[in-house]
Image (cartoon, rainbow, N blue to C red):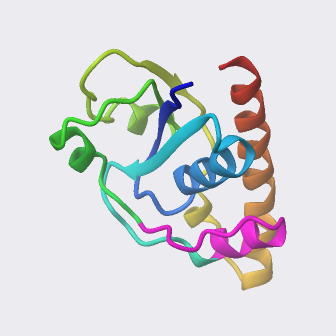
Amino acid sequence: MEKKKVMFICIHNSGRSQMGEAFLRNFAGDRFEVASAGLEAGNLNPMVVKAMEEIGISMTGHFAKKAQDFVDRGEHFDYVITVCDETNAERCPMFPGKHERIHWSFPDPSAIGGTEAEKLAGIRPIRDAIGEKVKSFIASA
């Protein structure tokens, strides 16, 4: 059976899309080939990495990538899932070929201020919500 290809996209590929990629790979990497990218390439959010490690999911090897690079290489995906706000989702480049475009809006972890503990506390609900959406996606795909 050929794996379905999934692309998660957010603004900087620093948090939400990275979590989507990590969750899908962890939960169903045998069924899906998964990648993530940003409208721009930022830096991986270290608090997101910590939040994922708390639940036993490593993001070792993850780094921020630019969506346009995948488009320029002509990469095809079965699903393109935007995880930023609606306005930024509309800026997502058009990937070649036929694919289903899905939008899930989540708050931006990088917008959470405060101490490290406060940032982690703010990221955990976002992480958990993304994890639940990925589980629902797996069940329906």
Q: Farthest residue in the bottom direction? A: 115
The quadrant of the rendering that contains the N terminus is top right
> Residue 104 placed where, x, y %?
60, 32
Foreground: 27 or 68? 27
Identify the residue at image location x=22%, y=50%: 69
In this rendering, does residue 90 appear at all?
A: yes
Give left or right: position of 19 versus 5: right
Q: How many marks?
A: 0
Residue 119 x %, y %:
72, 73
Residue at (71% x, 18% y) in the render: 140
Queried whether the magenta region covers residue 94, the answer comes back as no
Horizontal and vertical percent for residue 122? 76, 64
Q: Is residue 21 above or below residue 33?
A: below
Q: Which residues are magenta?
A: 47-63
* Res 83 seen here: no
Image quadrant occupied by the C terminus:
top right
For residue 39, side relative to residue 116 (left or right):
left
Q: Where's residue 103, x and y in %?
A: 54, 27
For this orientation, the residue located farthest to the front is 1
- Name the residue nearer the viewer: 27 or 72: 27
Residue shown at the point (63%, 55%) measured from the top left:
22
- Residue 25's place in the image compared with 101, above or below, is below
Residue with the most extreme left position: 72
Residue that appears at 80% across and 81% down: 117
Horizontally, residue 101 falls left or right of residue 27, namely left
Residue 56 among those drawn in magenta? yes
